[in-house]
Image: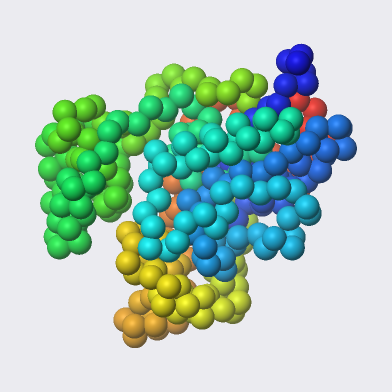
């Protein structure tokens, strides 16, 4: 098979609310029009979970235009999503798509998840018992004490970790306790692509437009029934896991259901956290080399003209 005909990997990345999903569908159709089959692989950590639909803006199957989608609804809310597990699962899905002669389009805004797939990331070992001890300490004492410990042990990694990101702090300490260097909570200095050829497409909006869009999206989540979704997920074990119950929007909806937040406060808190998350996403993806940055609704036919 010639290089031009060989299956390719595409990555459509950017902050939440920028229109990545719509562009990925348009790109898949544009590739199909050029005689190339294409399949979509999810790179949004929260869209891995069954039943987490409204709060993640998950595209319903009826709106997927007949394009195969992979790694949606593959975990229960009580499951813990790990990046190393995701890397293996996503690369297997991509390899399967390529085996069918189709291009794979990786779509999402979870920066470390995307990076783990498209770059040559190797993850250090895991220790479930140690991690459980650290997570119990996190639940008991909060992230501050653990972050101070990380800062003493590995100042370079601590400088790259959000002091409020308890899960990232726990993972770094887990790795250090096993005598390994941390994976750094960041891209390697000179990341190498896992699969060639790969094309990276970033979707962006001016900050003021993105903020308005995100605030409206959060208000729409509550109008569309997020509280009912979260109540059903709670009955299905949402609070038994570590990852899903802490998702932006879901944690605030749980607090509202428990009477700890008013609806107005739950919405406002979700909006503020979403804006902060979007800023981190923009910063993460801006570090990628060779990204073609486009506006929402960009010409997918033009993007499908892969540089030979």
- Quarter holding the C terminus? top right
Where's residue 26, x and y in %? Answer: 78, 46
- Quarter holding the N terminus? top right
Where's residue 164, x and y in %? Answer: 28, 53
In this rendering, the answer to whether 261 lies above or below 34 is: below
In this rendering, the answer to whether 252 lies above or below 117 is: below
Q: Is residue 130 left or right of residue 108?
A: left
Task: Pick out the residue farthest to the top.
Answer: 2
Identified at 76% across, 41% down, the residue is 28
Residue in the foreground of this view, choosing between 40 and 12: 40
The answer, for residue 91, to whether it is visible in the render is yes
Identified at 78% across, 54% down, the residue is 65
Identified at 43% across, 63% down, the residue is 77
The answer, for residue 109, to whether it is visible in the render is no
Way the structure is coloured? rainbow
Q: Is residue 111 left or right of residue 240?
A: right
Q: How many marks?
A: 0
Where's residue 7, x and y in %? Answer: 71, 26
Identified at 74% across, 60% down, the residue is 63
Where's residue 286, x and y in %? Answer: 52, 35
To which quarter of the image does residue 263 belong? bottom left
Residue in the foreground of this view, choosing between 79 and 176: 79
């Amino acid at each position: 098979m010639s290089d031009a005909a060989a299956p390719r990997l595409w990555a459509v990345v950017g902050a939440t609310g920028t229109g990545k999903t719509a562009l990925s569908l348009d790109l898949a159709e544009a590739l199909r029009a050029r005689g190339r089959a294409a399949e979509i692989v999810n790179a949004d950590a929260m869209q891995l979970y069954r039943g987490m639909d409204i709060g993640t803006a998950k595209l319903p199957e009826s709106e997927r235009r007949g394009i195969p989608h992979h790694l949606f609804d593959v975990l229960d809310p009580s499951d813990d999503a790990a990046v190393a597990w995701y890397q293996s699962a996503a690369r297997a899905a991509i390899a399967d798509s390529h085996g069918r002669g189709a291009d794979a389009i990786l779509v999402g805004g979870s920066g470390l998840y995307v990076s783990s797939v498209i770059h040559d990331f190797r993850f250090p070992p895991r220790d479930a018992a140690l991690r459980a001890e650290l997570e119990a300490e996190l639940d008991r004492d909060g992230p501050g004490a653990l972050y101070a410990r990380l800062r003493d042990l590995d100042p370079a990694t601590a400088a790259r970790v959000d002091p409020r990101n308890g899960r990232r702090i726990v993972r770094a300490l887990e790795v250090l306790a096993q005598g390994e260097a941390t994976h750094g909570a960041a891209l390697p200095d000179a990341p190498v692509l896992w699969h060639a050829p790969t094309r990276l497409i970033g979707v962006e909006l001016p900050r003021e437009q993105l903020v308005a869009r995100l605030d409206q999206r959060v208000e729409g989540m509550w109008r569309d029934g997020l509280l009912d979704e979260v109540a059903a997920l709670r009955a299905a074990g949402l609070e038994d896991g570590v990852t899903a119950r802490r998702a932006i929007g879901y944690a605030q909806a749980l607090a509202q259901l428990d009477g700890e937040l008013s609806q107005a406060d739950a919405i406002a808190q979700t909006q503020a956290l979403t804006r902060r998350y979007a800023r981190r996403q923009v910063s993460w993806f801006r570090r990628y080399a060779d990204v073609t940055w486009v506006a929402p609704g960009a010409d997918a036919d033009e993007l499908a003209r892969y540089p030979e």
